[in-house]
Each structure stands twice: as structure tokens, then as C-alpha cells.
Image (tube, grey):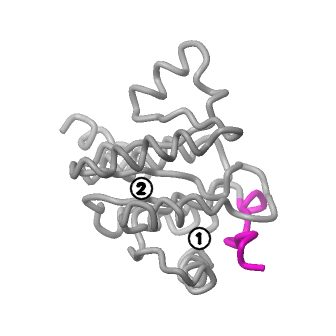
Amino acid sequence: MIRQRLARTIARLMRYRMVGDVPQTGILVGAPHTSNWDFITMLLVMWQGGAHPRVLVKKQLFKGPLGWLLRAFGGVPLDRDNAGTVVRDLVAEADTGKPFRLILAAEGTRSRGEYWKSGFLRLSRDTGLPITLAFFDPPTRTMGFGPTFHASDDVVADMDVVRAFYADKLGIRPKNATPPRLREEG
């Protein structure tokens, strides 16, 4: 309740409008991922709706006091060289039947890249959990949730949904955004 009030107060002070409904469970893709502030803004988006998500964060950031803070906010250290272990643990956690919300930045980096990471689709297929597209868009002063869908065997069709939704979302530093495209698309 305190987090929800805090998030709503901060959003109001920043003059941002919340759109969409907080999913009860699922994989949440936060994009565009263009700044260090994206972690905070996605937490605000989730907290406004009363949700307490898990957030994948590269393991290098879990050193010192920042590590304690990230864990307190639901951070899950991701070892990019051994991501399979983290994914297996998350799949097991999702299988408990309790509400499970995991936020990840499919772009994988705050700077412009060539491809998104496909882990959100694999996690959705492995767990049966839906994918919800989340965003923070400074030009329109909106943040929140877009469409929810289940990953299919048609990667291109799934990514067409993602591309259509994020086509007009700019993020904090638009030049850093990676276009929604997966290496698996060919």
C-alpha cells in the first residue's frame, strides 16, 4: 500500500498518466530500454497498480549497497554467461501457482543494439504465462501496460504484435532504442 501511494504521488508530481491494467501474472517486457531510469520507471508502473514484480538485472550491478537495494526492489541477478540457471529457477518459481510477475528489458542494454533478446518468448512458452508489454513514454507523459498475449510458435507474428505496440513509444533517450527485432526472425 505504501509503495502504491508513493508511486501514484510521484507519477502525479511528474504529471504522468497511467494507462492499462496491471497484469495479475506473467512476463512483462519493459521497453524502450534507453536509460538507467528505466528500472525506476518500471517499478513505478508496477507499484501504481499494487504489484510487486521480480526484475531481471545484470549481475554486475549487485555489488555493494546497490545490490541490497536492487534485491529489496525485487531484483534478480542475471549472469548473461549462464542465463539458463536463472531461467530454470524462474520457471520453477512461476510453477508454484502464486502470482508471478517478471519484468525484463528485452533490448538487453540501454544503448542501441541490433537485436532484442528472445528470453521473454522462451519464458512464456516454457511457463505458459502471458506476455504483457509495458512502457514509459516521456513525449506523451504516459506509462503503463499495452497488449497481453501468449507466445506462439510463430516468432515473426509474435514480434509483429510487439513492433506494432512499440512503434510510437520513444523512451527517455530515443536514439538509444533498439528496434524490436530478434535474431531468430532471420
Is 107 or 15 nearer to us in this picture? 107
Kindly identify the amino acid type of the residue bearing the numbered disc 2: Arg
Near mark 2 (Cα within 10 A), the count class, few <14, some 14-19 or many ≥20, is few
**Which type of secondary structure does the marked residue at label 1 adopt?**
loop
Q: Position of residue 28 (x, y in %)?
A: 44, 59
The reply to whether the magenta stretch includes residue 183 is yes
Kindly identify the amino acid type of the residue bearing the numbered disc 1: Lys
31 sits left or right of 108 in the view: left
- In the rendered view of the protein, which quadrant contains the C terminus? bottom right
Q: How many marks?
A: 2
The reply to whether the magenta stretch includes residue 81 is no
Residue linked to disc 1: 169
Return the mark for residue 1: none
Is 155 or 138 nearer to us in this picture? 155
Q: Quadrant of residue 1?
A: top left
Q: Residue at x 34, y 44 (%)?
A: 93
- Tell which residue pokes out farthest to the left in this image: 1
Q: Position of residue 160 (x, y in %)?
A: 59, 84
Residue linked to disc 2: 15
Closer to us: mark 1 or mark 2?
Answer: 1
